[in-house]
Amino acid sequence: MQEPFTKSYRLENREQTARWGRRLGELLQAGDLIALVGDLGAGKTTLTKAIGQGMGISDPITSPTFTLVQEYYGKVPLFHFDPYRLKEPGDMFDLGFDEYFERSGVVIIEWADKISQLLPPERLTIELEIVPDTDPASEDTPRSLRVSAFGERYIALAEAI
Ligand code: ADP
Ligand code: MG
């Protein structure tokens, strides 16, 4: 596969992260795959909530850390995975992981690097990071966000954000 198309952003606070996520959510279509990468507290779940809002999902989005997957039904369904507690990547198939890609929804996966070998090559990968040396006492701290788009659909998507 070609080199990915990449783009970087700095999100100063939660509102900027939310706005960025809503914008992405508005652009998503059935079949899209978003792979989220970043440490605990980087903002993967926060971003997913905003993406869901942008998709017009009205149910509150919660972290699927214990359930591994949560399903939300809007105009386009959202399937939100969190394999953080997964013992081994192959256990994803017990959840019917591969079938989710046939269900005409948007798939968002936190900790996507834990199951990278299971992911279709065409996807939008979003890496989130707490900007180092920022005030840890503040409720809002900046994030760096890096998008890598693999495949034509995702390059167009990344360009449109
Ligand atoms: P993850 O799912 O990556 O473990 P969460 O989204 O659950 O991370 O947690 C991120 C935490 O950081 C939340 O408590 C959120 O309010 C806080 N936060 C502070 N500043 C930001 C920001 N700029 N963007 C996203 N989250 C932020
Ligand atoms: Mg999370």
Image: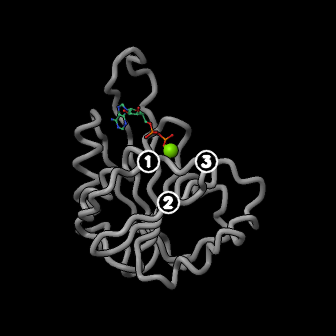
Residue for point 37% across, 48% down: 47
Image quadrant where one finds the C terminus? bottom left
Q: Residues within 10 Å of mark 3 (few under 14, many from 20)?
A: few
Residue for point 34% across, 22% down: 139
Side (left or right) of 45 relative to 18: right
- For the residue pair 82 and 27, the one nearer the viewer reads as 82
Ligand 1 quarter of the rendering: top left
- For the residue pair 49 and 73, the one nearer the viewer reads as 73
Q: Residues within 10 Å of mark 2 (few under 14, many from 20)?
A: some
Rounded to the nearest angstrom, the CA distance separating label 3 from label 2 is: 10 Å
Side (left or right) of 57 relative to 134: left
Which image quadrant is residue 23 in? Answer: bottom left
Residue 62: give its label: 1
Which image quadrant is residue 53 in? Answer: bottom left
* Residue at which label 3 appears: 66
Residue 138 horizontal/vertical position (percent) = 34, 18
Mark 2: amino acid: Gln
Mark 1: amino acid: Thr
Badge 2 element: strand
Mark 3: amino acid: Phe
- Residue contact between numbered discs 3 and 2, judged by CB atoms under 8 Å: no
Image quadrant where one finds the N terminus? bottom right
Residue for point 22% across, 48% down: 19
- For the residue pair 104 and 151, the one nearer the viewer reads as 104
Badge 1 element: loop
* Residue at which label 2 appears: 70
